[in-house]
Amino acid sequence: MQDVTEKFIYPEHTGVARFMAACERRETDATPVWFMRQGGSSFPAYREILAKYDVMTIAKTPELSSSVALIPVNELGVDAAVLYADIMLPVEEMGIELHLEPNIGPIIHNPIRSLRDVESLRLPGTDEVTPFVMGGIRLLRQELEGKRAVIGIAGAPFTLACYMIEGRPSRDYHTAKALMYSQPEIWHQLMDKISTVIAGYLVAQVRAGVNAVQVFDSWIGSISPSTYREYVLPYTQRVFSAVKLAGAPAIHFGTGTSSLLGVMAEAGGDVMSVDWRVDLDIAWKQIGYERGLQGNLDPTLMLTEWPVIEEAARDVLRRANNRPGHIFNFGHAMPIGSDPDLLRRLVDTVHELTQR
């Protein structure tokens, strides 16, 4: 097994060297680029796979998940491959029963409603959690060693807790937040279990070979800074502390977080990923320059024309001001229907404009 404390030296001018240098806020030969949901349905090769297998089957089959993760690397020239996996996979191992409803998202058949529900959740050992994910990581690492970075992913404790309580995607999160405020003992026990599992899950990914991880807190923008500090911060800190001890950098992603950036930075991620609702230079000032920053092109721009995309990309780079630690990405997931030719042009343009 790889010694997770070992420090690797990657060949210069490769995607993995560029990406890792940015995670550590060191100078790079150019700004690294990757896109959230970059393995999505923009590519014919992915649509061919999706015509034969559903999303969960792809995610649970190492040969398929690694193949999908490689498509944007080969098609676009991005600097990192991201693990093809749903953030709900580890909670299945805890005893949550779910299925993915097309165009809706995860539907949970046994949502959390009581302390007894929380107590019944399993705490699987690190080696028990999604072994198929680790298999996919090993295949990716073998294919990309020395060329591109491999990014592991997981859902953040807050977002996973909300899914587990709501039972499905929500616009307002009323059920989850009502439980959090009115029955804090249930909330804290649930968050304790989730953070324990996610910490172990990400450490296992590091041991399997990912270069870095990204933690998705997609629903975190629904609460205030003081609420975050009381109900969320200790559990997110536990996750990032475990990843740091394992020897990998971590990216912390959330949406609607302009009021939360300061307190989220306290959670301990090495790079903060911000959405398009806050200007990148303002966000970096709020977060603090001792952390890297990822983002933050509005993904909707990919449904427009190249001159519009180029102008917006140049603005993001101008705001980054060549500061070490910037990773270019969207402010959220790549929209379905994005033109691969425009994506490829965007990757090339960012690399060309930031060559040092």
Image: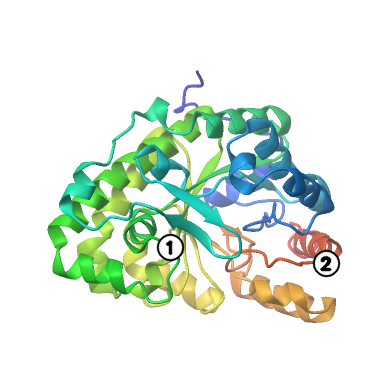
Percent x, y of residue 137: 59, 33
Residue 186 vs residue 303: left or right?
left
Contact between labelled residues 2 and 1, with CB atoms less than 8 Å apart: no
Percent x, y of residue 229: 24, 65
- Give the quarter of the image for residue 176: bottom left
Numbered circle sitting on residue 168: 1
Numbered circle sitting on residue 342: 2
How many other residues sit within 10 Å of disc 1, few (<14), some (14-19) or many (≥20)? Answer: some
Residue lying at the far front of the rendered structure: 109
- Give the quarter of the image for residue 346: bottom right
User: Hey, what amino acid is under mark 1?
Assistant: Arg
User: Hey, what amino acid is under mark 2?
Assistant: Leu
Residue 61 vs residue 306: left or right?
left
Residue 132 vs residue 160: left or right?
right
In terms of secondary structure, where does tag 1 sit? loop
Numbered circle sitting on residue 309: none
Residue 209 visible to the viewer: no
Percent x, y of residue 28: 66, 51
